[in-house]
Each structure stands twice: as C-alpha cells, then as structure tokens.
Amino acid sequence: MTESLLKRAFGAPAEGSAAPALTKPAAGAAPADAAPAPVVIAIDGPAGSGKSSVSKAAAVRLGYGFLDTGAAYRALAWHALEHGADTSDATAVLEVFGDFDYAISLDTRDRWVRVGGVDVTTAIREPRVTDAVSGVARVPAVRKAVNELFRRLVASAGLPGVVVEGRDITTVVFPDAPVRILLTAAPEVRAARRSAELTDHDAAKVAAALHKRDAADSTVVDFLTAAPGVEVVDSTHLDFEQTVDAVLSVVDNTMGARDGR
Ligand code: DC
C-alpha cells in the first residue's frame, strides 16, 4: 500500500513547478558524470527552537540549499482540510495522501511550496493548519513516503549542499549526514519566541499550544534528546546571529575533522 501511495503521490512532477526534477523519483543508478551527492547538514529541533530561520540563515551563509521538511506535513494537512478530511483519522489522511501532488523549492532566494500547482507557501502557516498538522505527521505510511521524498529532493537538487531541518532528520531521514545537529532551547524561551512571532496572540495561549503540539509530536519522534553522534546547540542564552554562528562552527569543526583540517 505504501509503495502504491508513494508512486501515486510523488510519481509525477507538479504542474507549473520551476524545478520538475524535484518531484521525480530518481530512476536507476546515477550516470558516471553525475554531480556528487550534496553535503547534508541535518538539523532537528522542537517548535520555537529557531531551527527554521537559523537553518535558512546557515544555508545562505554556506551557499547551500534549504529544505524545510515540516512544510510537507503542513502542506498535507492543508490538502486534507481542503478535502474536508478528518486529520485525526489515519485512514482519512491516507485517502487524501493518494492524490497529494507536492513540490517545494530548495532555493533560499526563491522559496515556495505548491500542492497540485497551487501556491500554499503562506496558507500552510495558518493556525488551522498548525492545529491539524500533528495528526497527519503521526501516520507511519505518510512518514515513510515523505522521508523518501526528502532524500530524492536532496539527491536531485544539483546543489553542493543542503541544510535539512525538521524532526527525525538526524536519526531516520539522514542518519549518515556528515553534520547532524539538535537545536534546543528551554521551553519558556521557545514559547516566548513563538509569541513574539505572532504579534496578535496571547502569550499564555501560544505557550499552551506549543506545549500541546510538543506533547503530540513527541509521541511520534523524540526530538528533545540528541542521538549518539548528534551535536547539541542550545540557543537558550543565544540571540539569532549567535545561534547561526554556533551552528556554522559545528559545521566547520565537523567538516574540518572529516577533511583532516
Ligand atoms: O517545523 P514545523 O512546525 O513546520 O512542523 C510542522 C509539523 O510537522 C510539526 O507538528 C512537526 C511535524 N514534523 C515532523 O513530524 N517531522 C518532520 N521532519 C518535520 C515536521
């Protein structure tokens, strides 16, 4: 079932996609003159740890692409809501996953997310989608297919490197990435950052929603504990630029050690 879902969901490039290769599964072995596989910088972390903005800034400074993996789950939640599906019902989620035609840009200068050719870049950040996303992200067949898609997107990006951020990126999606980082921050700091982002929201409500989502997500993926070999960057006492610098210094040290520098 997963295999057919995979083919149906991701077999064809999205209409209007500027980068059709992104949604196309790689067929067979790479040709001898193919570009080397991109360097993967895998970054995990909970909501409000700053992982998305920090990862993007790190990608810009490295001249790499950026893959926000949460966008795929958000886009699927958006797609499910469009179909009136109950996102807490795994069977209903799998049903709408069958015609989920997803495309995303890895270009930091031109970021977009599309479902069936519709630009959902902004829509997937709406609170109704945020409220529904944990339901779709906990379906194992969805995770398996989406994780495969992430590997294909990175492999076919034609970029020197890609910073990939999300949950279980360091452990399941790219366990062999040369650089693997868990970005954390104390819960109260994460809640404060989230409420500062959402100006018209009550801070207490934001903290409650964030803790609820952490609790729901942590039943599926342990994103608060670093797996062996994963470097922790704790941003509790760091500002944005200091956090980006801390991430880049892990990249530099790890790649330097790998290259014998
Ligand atoms: O990072 P975000 O808030 O955009 O993530 C949206 C949701 O998707 C969140 O509930 C966690 C989940 N997610 C996941 O389970 N695995 C990932 N690799 C990325 C996100």
Image (cartoon, helix red, strand yellow):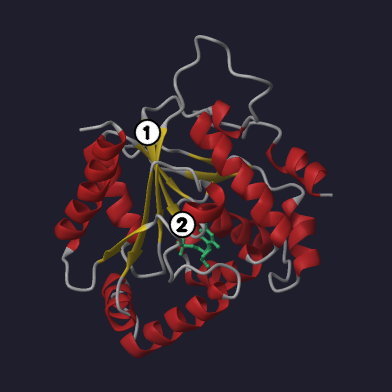
Find residue 92 and report its image quarter. Answer: bottom right
Decide which of tag 2 and tag 1 comes sooner along the chain: 1
27 or 206: which is nearer to us? Answer: 27
Residue 221 higher or lower than 155, as above or below: below
Are there few (<14), some (14-19), or many (20+) residues within 10 Å of tag 2? many
Amino acid bearing label 1: Gly
Task: Look at mark 2 in the image and give the residue it sits on.
Answer: 166
Q: Residue at x 58, y 12 (%)?
A: 31
Ligand 1 lies under 8 Å from the Cβ of mark 2: yes
User: Is residue 213 rendered to the left or right of residue 146?
Assistant: left
Query: Can the viewer see residue 118 in this picture?
Result: no
Q: Residue furthest top?
A: 33
Are there few (<14), some (14-19), or many (20+) residues within 10 Å of tag 1? many
x and y, in percent, of residue 34 in the image: 50, 15
Task: Look at mark 1 in the image and give the residue it sits on.
Answer: 161
Q: Residue at x 20, y 33 (%)?
A: 261
234 or 126: which is nearer to us? Answer: 234
x and y, in percent, of residue 161 in the image: 37, 33
x and y, in percent, of residue 127 in the image: 48, 72
Amino acid bearing label 2: Gly
At numbered mark 2, what does the secondary structure look like: helix, strand or loop? strand
x and y, in percent, of residue 41 in the image: 37, 44
What's the CA distance linking mark 2 and mark 1? Answer: 17 Å
105 or 4: which is nearer to us? Answer: 4
Q: Residue furthest bottom?
A: 204
At numbered mark 1, what does the secondary structure look like: helix, strand or loop? strand
